[in-house]
Image (spheres, rainbow, N blue to C red):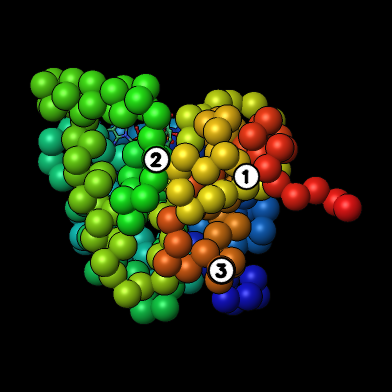
Amino acid sequence: MGTDRMKKVCIIGASGKLGQYMIRHALERGYEVVGVCRERSVPKLAAFGDRITVVPGPTNDPEVIRRAVDGCDGVLTVLVPWGVQQYASGTAQAVLDHARPGARLVFSCGWHITRDGKDRYSWRFTTLLRIATWLGRLFRAVEIDDQVEACRRVFASDTRWTVVRGSSLEEGESQGLPVWSRHVGDPVLASDLTRRVDFALFMVEALTDDTLVQEAPAIVGCRTPSALAHTPGPA
Ligand SMILES: NC(=O)c1ccc[n+]([C@@H]2O[C@H](COP(=O)([O-])OP(=O)(O)OC[C@H]3O[C@@H](n4cnc5c(N)ncnc54)[C@H](OP(=O)(O)O)[C@@H]3O)[C@@H](O)[C@H]2O)c1
């Protein structure tokens, strides 16, 4: 899809850190923006004033999502596994069910999501993930398995999706569009660090990048040592 055909976008999970960066990138491109966030988080979006439309409500509520994505050419979804209420899979399903046919759907998650099982994780990464999954379940705070289920449903759909898999994140000025690879474990990703603002940039750029349709790019900051060492530079 060319940039000219991307006019109105919905950002689901708009009030979080990633969501707010995505709003800024989308507004800079001149898109009309609709944001969805929990009712209690609406004040976090006050700085955007009337430059965006806010639809308050839980992101896994199909009716909230149906209203929010109406007429949108693209939908950017922050998939978060909070609570034990199938929040991530409910959110993904609502987007898959209600976005208009042909809309570009871009979802965020972490490197722990694997599309084809060919990702190679370090011992440290796998151990930390196991501990986080176990603790999340124990305290009924986070349901990482549900984010896995959400992505499984996206991968199985015939929509125009992209699942962007973020590395560890840090704050800071933009360094530019992250580089990506199909598989965690590839040398280019070894630095495992991306600025959050650039994660958001990649999500928004993906809306108009047809080469990313039905891809699950794992990203890393373009100025990190591994990206600089393994990305071809100018001759
Ligand atoms: N954090 C990392 O290191 C990391 C690493 C790799 C990938 N990622 C991916 O990046 C994306 C965003 O991560 P982030 O860390 O930058 O977070 P974030 O943008 O701050 O987003 C957190 C989101 O979760 C919502 N939220 C928080 N508590 C909630 C609750 N109890 N119930 C429902 N919603 C709740 C927030 O909404 P409110 O504004 O309403 O609270 C917000 O939309 C996720 O897809 C994550 O998998 C993160």
Amino acid found under the numbered disc labelled 1: Pro
**Dot 1, crowdedness within 10 Å: few (<14), some or many (≥20)?**
many
Residue corresponding to mark 3: 211
Hey, what amino acid is under mark 3?
Answer: Thr
Disc ID at residue 178: 1
Instruction: Calculate the distance from the C-alpha at mark 1 to the C-alpha at mark 3.
Output: 15 Å
Mark 3 lies within 8 Å of ligand 1 (Cβ measured): no
Position of the N terminus, as image quadrant, is bottom right
Toward the right, the furthest residue is 235
Q: Amino acid at mark 2?
A: Arg
Q: Is residue 225 visible?
A: yes
- The residue at which mark 2 appears reads as 120
Looking at the picture, tell me which residue is in the foreground, 157 or 18. 157
Q: Position of residue 175 (x, y in %)?
A: 71, 37
Q: Which residue occupies 48% across, 53% down?
A: 182
Q: Secondary structure at mark 1?
A: loop
